Image: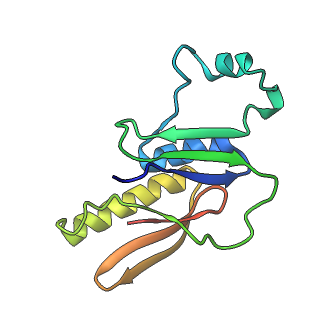
Amino acid sequence: MAIPFQVTFDAHHPPTLAEFWALALQYVLQPPPPGYATWDAFLDEMDVPGDMRESRAAIVDPQGEGPRVFFQQVPEGKTAKNRVHLDVSVSGGPGTDDATRRSRIEQHAALLEGAGATVAARIEEFGEFWIVMHDPEGNEFCVT
């Protein structure tokens, strides 16, 4: 049996990064716990101070299949290349013709550029094509 996991990002502003990655992965912002209409209602009950309320955020797969992605505020900025990165796989996989795969990758990359990502490189190797990008806080990822 596999062990459940979540992916955690250090972030300057977790809510902004959560919104970006929700778009990138077609996830949704994590809803408040059962019994609470809003996160503010929950945080009020937990006595979380106002200046701490944007220090964390999370997104979830609306179908409940993928891992939760958590964003936690840290004081320092990103200073080096990621040792781990996400591949956002939108191409349709090996059974999809090359033109369709490339078009899907380019379209998704353009959507993410509009949301604050930047293109670092377009790569063609061994019959594959992908785009290396940086999210709004500089984290590397690939659109494949």
Please say if 47 is above or below 84.
above
The x and y percentages for residue 1 are 33, 52
Please say if 133 is above or below 128.
above
Q: Is residue 74 left or right of residue 139?
A: right
The x and y percentages for residue 8 are 59, 52
Quarter of the image with the C terminus is bottom left
How many numbered marks are there? 0
Q: Residue at x 58, y 45 (%)?
A: 70
The x and y percentages for residue 117 are 57, 58
Please say if 82 is above or below 6.
below
The x and y percentages for residue 139 are 61, 62
> Which residue is farthest front?
1
Please say if 129 is above or below 66.
below
Looking at the image, what colour scheme do you see? rainbow
Q: Is residue 125 left or right of residue 78?
A: left
Q: Quadrant of residue 42?
A: top right
Q: Residue at x 68, y 46 (%)?
A: 72
Task: Work out whether residue 135 or residue 55 is closer to the camera in this orientation and state it.
Answer: 55
Task: Work out whether residue 143 or residue 30 is closer to the camera in this orientation and state it.
Answer: 30
